[in-house]
Image (tube, helix red, strand yellow):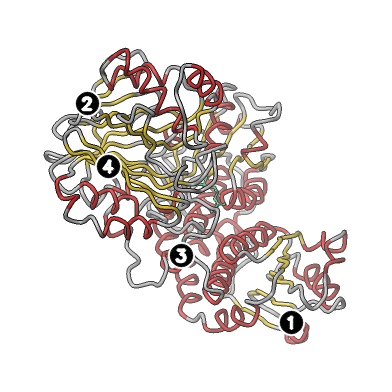
Amino acid sequence: MCGIIGYIGDKKASDILISGLSHLEYRGYDSSGIALMNNNNVEVYKAQGKLINLINILKEKENHLLNYNIGIGHIRWATHGAPSIVNAHPHTCCFNNLTLVHNGIIENYQEIKEELIKEGYNFLSQTDTEVAANLIAKEYTKTKNLLDAMQMAVKKMKGAFAFCAIHKDEPDKIVVAKRNAPLVIGLGQGENFVASDIPAIIEYTKKAIYLTDHQVGVVKKDSVEIYDENDNKVENKIEYLPFEAMAISKMGFKHFMLKEIHEQGDVVRNVLSGKLLQIDKSIKLDEFKLNKEQIKKISRVQIIACGTSLHAGLVGKYIIEKFAKIPVDVEPSSEYIYRDTIADENTLVIGISQSGETADTITAIKQVKQKHSHIAIITNRADSTMARLADSLLPISAGIEVSVAATKSYMAQLISLYILSIYLHEQLGFSDFKEEIQNLKQELLELPNKVEALLEDTENIKKIAKKYSNFKDFIFIARGINFPSALEGALKLKEISYINATGYGAGELKHGPIAMLDNNMPVLAILNTGIVYDKVLSNCEEAKARQARLIGVTNYMAEKDIPLFDDLITIPFCSDLISPAVNIVVLQLLAYYISEYLGKDVDQPRNLAKSVTVE
Ligand code: M6R
């Protein structure tokens, strides 16, 4: 949450900072601000709300800002204090010479603040960042050196931070620091960049240094120096960035979300590529580092994730238990970390995360790592903190996902879990399910075409979205392997349209939620051919008997059952086992078009951020 950016070079810094922030807006959009330095002069500009408000302020300063070639910027997702101008970053210390942007949370900021107040420091905002700025400034009074001051200050702070600081008396550098929040330094020719994430700098450079926890760095226009937690200089580890600037364009779609939904056929192809070649060949999964003997020793699997990734994990439970016959627990990371979880060296822990930066999941993984469990990470960011914690890194290669609502990354997570389940089954040498596995492989290979066929004609979904866009509440029901689809469909709808939507296992309806049903509470039911079809149908009858309007999402429906439904969306025929990967496309589109009709901000829904880097 929150995005930070820094630039030092010969170009107009404000343009580069604004362009960078526009690519970090997915991390928060409560306020934004930049600080620009020219020799010993620093100017700060801030605006509440979306970045466009800051852009409008800067328009009047176009010429004035031409010679400001160093700067730091921030886009905020409010943690401490309301989303106001006074709480917006950058924050300047009370001596008015050090300016700071920050991503993360300083857990002991109150203690530090109280001490600083006793010493005569004063504060304008409610933020932990202003406290950090003053603490670094205090150290500066002793060291007269920004690097030393930062090194001393970070040792006194607890919690998570990525910092970029500038000081009026050292106009040739940006000093950065990192602990438990992402920070990357982009390397240019006669210019360097700092950012929370690659999209902010990818149009300028493909070379970068990822800071690791506890490192502090000095970024000048021609050099970068990094120091470890003992203040020793370390060698710069230069990496090549995996993205093209193209990946962060809408490519003609109205929203990133719609573009990303439409990319899902290719996403499936990418995940399968090199792993599933033919239906009669075993899955190849070199990224999974346990050998056959070690796999045989796995006694339990724990999947930890949040939000959409958690829903993918629930589908994973279903298929891993079925094919690998190992018990699987799936738990939100935020719950996992506050329990005495039972894990040992025979536990396979699977962390799932689109961003690889979700704070709760990172903490959970760090905790369980101490129990010597094998950690497999399924992530879309092979360059993320979580990826670096992995024993087995299973990258999903969905390409960068900009829209806050996860779509193609969910699809890629599902496919990775199918692949992993079949792989475990094959490595364990089971001889049952032979035909079912071959059919599943065949269906995985056919999936991209089915997804693309569905995306070719979305008129019916658009029509239904329009019809239901004014309802205030929704219930999504399903059973078996599609229960997580109901949860994910409801999550998609609520997060981008703000309609109250809840997913239930259809069998649970009559144990309470049915009390809410009437003709103002539409019920969306997922019914696929398979063992739960008749059961879900009975649950639909129960809902209809309470006057609920029924929307069916199905791969096949008997003629006699059709009249029960007010509206029906038919997906290409597929087995129940693979159907979550097809049904979800319908639910994503439905949420998208409802949000669109309501005129909501589809890609940047209120109160949310793409990467939740605070616990
Ligand atoms: O990056 P992660 O997958 O770890 O993020 C977890 C959730 O914050 C995320 O899935 C969230 O629920 C999505 N915005 C939902 O669309």
Circle 2 — which element? loop
Residue 86's spot in the image, x, y percent? 45, 43
* Disc number lying in front (4 or 3): 4
Give whichever of discs 2 and 1 has the lower sequence position.
2
Q: Would you name the residue on which mark 1 appears? A: 565
Q: Which residue occupies 49% across, 48% down?
A: 84
Q: CA distance from mark 2 to mark 1?
A: 71 Å
* Disc number lying in front (3 or 2): 2
Question: What is the three-letter code of the residue carrying label 1?
Answer: Phe
Q: Is residue 204 left or right of residue 280?
A: left
Question: What is the three-letter code of the residue carrying label 2?
Answer: Asp
Report the number of numbered marks. Answer: 4
Circle 3 — which element? helix
Q: CA distance from mark 4 to mark 1?
A: 62 Å
Question: What is the three-letter code of the residue carrying label 4?
Answer: Glu
Q: Which residue occupies 75% across, 65% down?
A: 531
From the viewer's side, name the closer residue of 282 and 462. Answer: 462
Give whichever of discs 3 and 2 has the lower sequence position.
2
Give whichever of discs 4 and 1 has the lower sequence position.
4
Q: Would you name the residue on which mark 3 appears? A: 257
Residue 90's spot in the image, x, y percent? 37, 40
The circle on residue 43 is 4
The quarter of the picture where the C terminus appears is: top right
Q: Is residue 585 above or below residue 410?
A: below
Q: CA distance from mark 3 to mark 2?
A: 45 Å
Q: Would you name the residue on which mark 2 appears? A: 169
Residue 369's spot in the image, x, y percent? 55, 25
Q: Quadrant of residue 93?
A: top left
Q: CA distance from mark 4 to mark 3?
A: 36 Å
From the viewer's side, name the closer residue of 422 and 588. Answer: 588
